[in-house]
Image (cartoon, coloured by chain):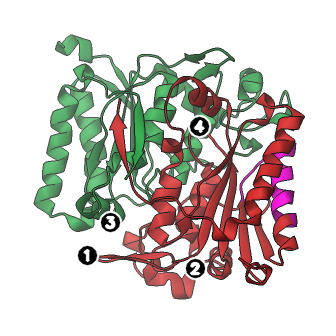
Chain colours: A red, B green
Amino acid sequence: MSENKKAGKKVLLVYAHQNPSPLDTALKTATEDELSKQGCTVTVSSLYNMDFGPRASGDGITGECCNPELFSNGVGAYDDCREKSLAQEITDEQKKVKEADLVIFQFPLHLFSMPAVLRGWMDKVLTRGFAYKTTESSRVTLLKGKLAISVTRGDHVWNDIKNTDNEDPLAYLWPLPHGVLHLCGFKVLAPQISSPPKLTSEEQQKGMVESWVKRLKTIWIEEPIKPRCTLKLL
Amino acid sequence: MSENKKAGKKVLLVYAHQNPSPLDTALKTATEDELSKQGCTVTVSSLYNMDFGPRASGDGITGECCNPELFSNGVGAYDDCREKSLAQEITDEQKKVKEADLVIFQFPLHLFSMPAVLRGWMDKVLTRGFAYKTTESSRVTLLKGKLAISVTRGDHVWNDIKNTDNEDPLAYLWPLPHGVLHLCGFKVLAPQISSPPKLTSEEQQKGMVESWVKRLKTIWIEEPIKPRCTLKLL
């Protein structure tokens, strides 16, 4: 891909570190620097700083809900009422997603999954009617063609499983790339996973940042991962 | 198992429906009724009613944090400071978990996973030092021998996948039973999954409640599911 094709691309970084380690900060800065160098615009949604409210209650709706009896987040009644009464916190996020060519989710693993604040962002922002539609006979992806990737910092438990249990740690990240993002039509790239800062040397951390920057250089032409899986009990 | 062995058992129902359908309410009532009939005590943590704050920020700590620089929820510094400064909201939940012989998680699927409020409950309540310990060479489960089960209401997307995609919907629930609960030492029973209320008749819903009640009658002697898996790309 030529420089021209990279230039002008829009990137949304959804950042969910409550207390970033130097490694998390270095990865975030590297993302902004490298992509800016390519001529891209990077917008950051820093969920803790924004005080994003993750609970899937009715607080994402400001006006009248079309069907308050049946209101629920996620796969809910959002499509009925989104035009007129989604809270600005939500529509702002949806606008950023809509404009983005690439969405990067940067978060630490919390007990085998993303933190609640990011889980809540997905429920409230990637709503039916905005991100996808389902009918009795089909699913329609509304965010087709955008790239998505998770930049995930493992924890002790992750590290432990990776080393000793012979389990595929990807199984735990599965609901993110293969459930949510695939449903919305994203082309999902393989996750960028780094080891916990406490278990790595400064030198190793420097290497992790460098390998992420190297990957960013060709991220626009990377092949997405396959969107299907089966789970097999051992 | 004799009636005597059931009697006196303690059950914690962690309930995460923001806007329960009649089916959700019926399943909850059936749980309470059947287990009370068996002589068990049922405690309900209704997360939306309790206004449980899911965000993994420092609000679970009231006193001084031992290492504020490094504070993080989930696999974090909680073990350092839990004795003296966990918020009462958290210690109350931990007490309920500690006393329980069986923990039931009842929730609707939100985009392939549990709702953020339940995700946050896990991060904040099932902390290192309370629920498990990890060292360089081993993991220690601190809630060993308790039973756990999820009573999950599918959504349109779940239903759709189940019918058309040949994917195993269990893949999406995996981080719950096989990540979090196994880590803590729970004996995890197969999830009880019901179809979305909108896609089922009143008669079918009655059947779903009946089958759950039937299962509850012998739940104390049920075989747990296997705690390992591999994920295979199609």
Secondary structure beneath label 4: loop
Q: Nearer the viewer, residue A111 or B22?
A: A111
Q: Amino acid at mark 4?
A: Leu
Quarter placement of the N terminus of chain A? bottom right
Q: Amino acid at mark 2?
A: Leu
Mark 1 and mark 3 in contact? Answer it, CB < 8 Å. no
- Mark 4 — on which chain does it sit? A
Tags 2 and 3 both on a single chain? no
Where residue B144 appears, as percent x and y from the top left, is 46, 16
Q: Amino acid at mark 3?
A: His
Distance from Cα at disc 4 to Cα at disc 2 = 31 Å
Distance from Cα at disc 2 to Cα at disc 3 = 22 Å
Q: Which residue is mark 2?
A: A86
Q: Which residue is mark 1?
A: A136
Q: Which residue is mark 3?
A: B156
Q: Amino acid at mark 1?
A: Glu
Tags 4 and 3 both on a single chain? no
Q: Which residue is mark 4?
A: A111
Q: As displayed, is residue B234 above or below residue A66?
A: above
- In this rendering, position of residue B180 left or right of residue B172: right
* Residue under the point 63% across and 48% down: A115
- In this rendering, position of residue B82 left or right of residue B225: right
* Residue under the point 54% across and 47% down: A173
Mark 4 or 2 closer to N-term?
2
